[in-house]
Image: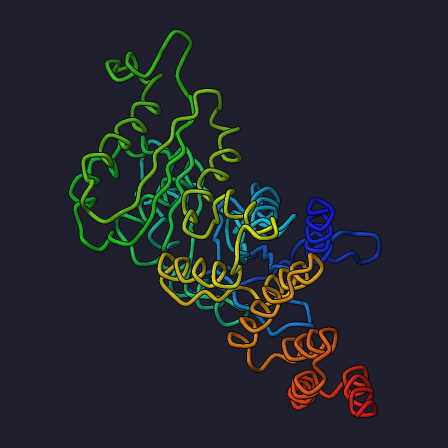
Amino acid sequence: MKQLLLLWLLAGSALAQAQTIRNNAVIIGRVDSVTSAVLKEKRKIWVYVPASAHDPTYLPQRYPVLYLLDGDAHFVSVMGMVQQLSTVNGNMVCPEMIVVGIPNTERRRDLTPTYAASAGPPGSSGGGESFTAFLEKELIPYVDAHYPTTPHRTFIGHSLGGLLVMNTLLHHPSLFDNYVALDPSMWWDGKKLLREAPGLLAQPQLAGRALFVGIANTMPTGFDTVRVRKDTSEATDFMRSKLTLRDELARHPNNGLRVVAKYYPNDSHSSVPLPATYDALRFLFQAYTPSPAALVDFYEPGYMPNPAAFVEAHYQRASAAMGYPVLPPEPMVHDLADYLLQSKQPTQALAMFQLNARNYPTSFSVHDSLGDYYSAQGQPTLAAAAYTKALRLKDTPATRQKLSKLRAKK
């Protein structure tokens, strides 16, 4: 029986988060643009906003933002991963997020922090600081003004994009909360950024930030990490630079930066973004993720006497980790309350409905649902009071009819 109820809840969650279908096309996002005075060009962005943002049943939500370099290459995979881990089948591995993919115009110019003469004529590289200024002064303010964002930001880049992620962390640490450098090109310009890293990793501004580094296997045949460290050939330069970065990060355990640098021996430079991004999301949002055992207890009647208290405490921990108040999402709490009601736990269901009422007192849906609960439990006075509150917020024929039926029975 428990399994059937759980499947009902998960199916409802998956259906609620289905993407828009229009003219037989599945719409996963939109193309927007920003006219940049810094870069002197118009830049397109690809934007995914969670489906819950468009659900008129509940109060509008706000979301953390994930900024993704090489957006034209990685947008679909990262967007799908975020959606899967935040909503599908009741997942809570990471929060729902807005994903902003940034396609390239002049990739090498924008993603390299310094000019390297060996890479081409002046202007072909070294525009990374200007691109960072574009992010800080134009793109982030634009996204915050036009989309329902929270202050929490994550920055992901691969290869040269990973180099820019590292440069931003070391030189502009306050710009993002989380940094994900996927196989970063630390070899660039004679390892200039790598040489700067020891001093910059000691700065107090890194405290409270998080960094995930994914390292692919870019060693020639016959090499292992021990031999690579001793080698001086150009063939191992890329791999050595990444291992040196990992070593340097380990030398600064007290700078307040949360760090994971993970080696993927079975992944190449091209294949590492997918598994490393998955691992990065799990690491960055580990405080957001309930334990599997807690979820089993939640869905087993009698194992968790106060599910609402569990949910509330969990989101208090998530708030502390993310640096701003994170409320349990109204739709999720509503679905959990319905599940508890269906599994014959009315007292626990009421506590969940009341949690929503405390967190979202101006939500029509919250009070309408409370009215339905009280009506089903044979408490017409409380049901009428809840319906009356709901109607003050939004007058709907269905709720007015429910209230009229209650009054007619008196």
Q: Is residue 247 left or right of residue 178?
A: left
Out of 391 and 407, give the one closest to the viewer: 407
Which residue: 64% across, 61% down?
A: 345
Where residue 306 appears, as percent x and y from the top left, is 51, 61
Number of numbered discs visible in the structure rendering: 0
Q: Is residue 251 above or below residue 97?
A: above
Out of 22 and 113, give the one closest to the viewer: 22
Where residue 45 appears, as percent x and y from the top left, is 56, 56
Residue at the farthest top position: 222
Rendering quarter of residue 389: bottom right
Where residue 88 appears, as percent x and y from the top left, is 64, 49
Q: Is residue 376 left or right of residue 70?
A: right
Out of 391 and 123, give the one closest to the viewer: 391
Q: Is residue 332 above or below residue 67?
A: below
Q: Is residue 382 above or below residue 176?
A: below
Out of 230 and 365, give the one closest to the viewer: 365
Q: Is residue 170 left or right of residue 219?
A: left
Q: Is residue 239 above or below residue 68?
A: above
Where residue 399 appears, as percent x and y from the top left, is 76, 83
Task: Name the quarter where the C terminus is drawn.
Answer: bottom right
